[in-house]
Image (spheres, rainbow, N blue to C red):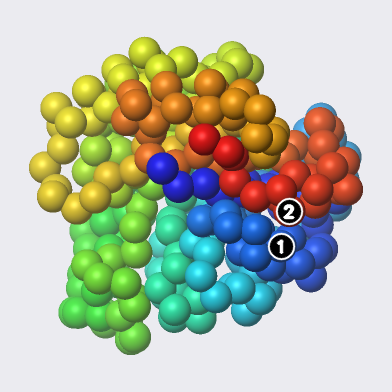
Amino acid sequence: MRFGVNLPNFGYFYDPRLMADLAYDAEQAGWDGFFVWDHLRIPFYPAPVADPWIQMTAVALRTERIKIGPMITPLSRRRPWKLARETVTLDHLSQGRLIMGVGLGYFVKEEFEAFGETSPAVQRAEILDESLDILVGLWSGQPFRYEGKHFHIQETQFFPAALQAPRIPVWVAGTWPKKAPFRRAARWEGVIPILDEERPLKADEVRGMVKLIRENRISKLPFDVVISGASSGAADGKDADLICPLAEAGATWWLDSFEPWKFDLEATRRRIRLGPPKI
């Protein structure tokens, strides 16, 4: 089991220099990952919003070991060739520590429709799948062309190739118990399960996800199941009671998430410095 910190790109966490400081604290305290949300607007929480890619650049420059990445980037509001350049650059800058978290996106009205972007879930899913195909093709450093429903790319070749081989790991978000996102995730390197309701995932639910993914898995690359929640960092056994059943059910990562309407900056800093859950 690996442990990460998952922070918003808005509110208290707007400043890239602050995020770099928090990532440094996380690395020193023994966390394995430092991940950043990717939002343009937060409808219910008026606050400054930062570009997560610039934040991750600051994080990469301040750290040496810890994994980094967006949790998650909605690919249907990105140009995949521009994102390919950004991700390969960040992969090299971080010396191969980037993990690419992707999904359909969440605030549809505020982050898609308000800017004239495609909003129906079916179309966003189609663009997500095509964008992933394009990213992999451009990450390869080999000649690449693409003909899809939404994208058409004449033969091109991007240099350099991604530093990680065979590619930058991709984690795909999905809302349980919908099956399609988990079948999509099975084609990649990880899944980030989300629930429609605000409650912790149960071990039986994780077990069901893992079963579905194994039934649809073709690749022999390692696969991660990434669960988010809130742990205390205390050595009182409560973190073990929370996390160990999820690990036994198949979870491989635990991310402590710090929503700014629940945690103030100092509480977040103290929790990060306590280190990963004690299990």
**Residue underneath mark 1:** 25
Task: Judge left or right: residue 138 versus residue 197.
Answer: left
Q: Nearer the viewer, residue 130 or 86?
A: 86
Task: Judge left or right: residue 193 versus residue 38.
Answer: left
Q: The disc labelled 2 sits on which kind of residue?
A: Arg
Q: The disc labelled 1 sits on which kind of residue?
A: Asp
The quarter holding residue 212 reads top left
Q: Decide: marks 1, 2 in contact (CB < 8 A)? A: yes
Crowding near pointer 2: few (<14 within 10 Å), some, many (20+)? some
Q: Which mark is residue 273?
A: 2
- Residue at 55% over, 49% down: 4
Give the percent coordinates (x, y) of residue 221: 19, 53
| Residue 251 visible | yes
- Residue at 16% over, 37% down: 217
The residue lying furthest to the front in this view is: 236
Give the percent coordinates (x, y) of residue 26: 66, 58
Pointer 1 or 2: first along the chain: 1
Placement of 39 over or under 151, stated as above or below: above
Give the percent coordinates (x, y) of residue 52: 65, 60
Placement of 107 over or under 238, stated as above or below: below
Secondary-structure class at tag 2: helix
Placement of 138 over or under 102, stated as above or below: below
Q: Which mark is residue 194?
A: none
Mark 1–mark 2 distance (CA, rounded to whole Å): 6 Å
- Residue at 34% over, 26% down: 248
Q: Nearer the viewer, residue 15 or 33?
A: 33
- Residue at 76% over, 67% down: 21
Crowding near pointer 1: few (<14 within 10 Å), some, many (20+)? many
Give the percent coordinates (x, y) of residue 59: 64, 69
Placement of 54 over or under 102, stated as above or below: below
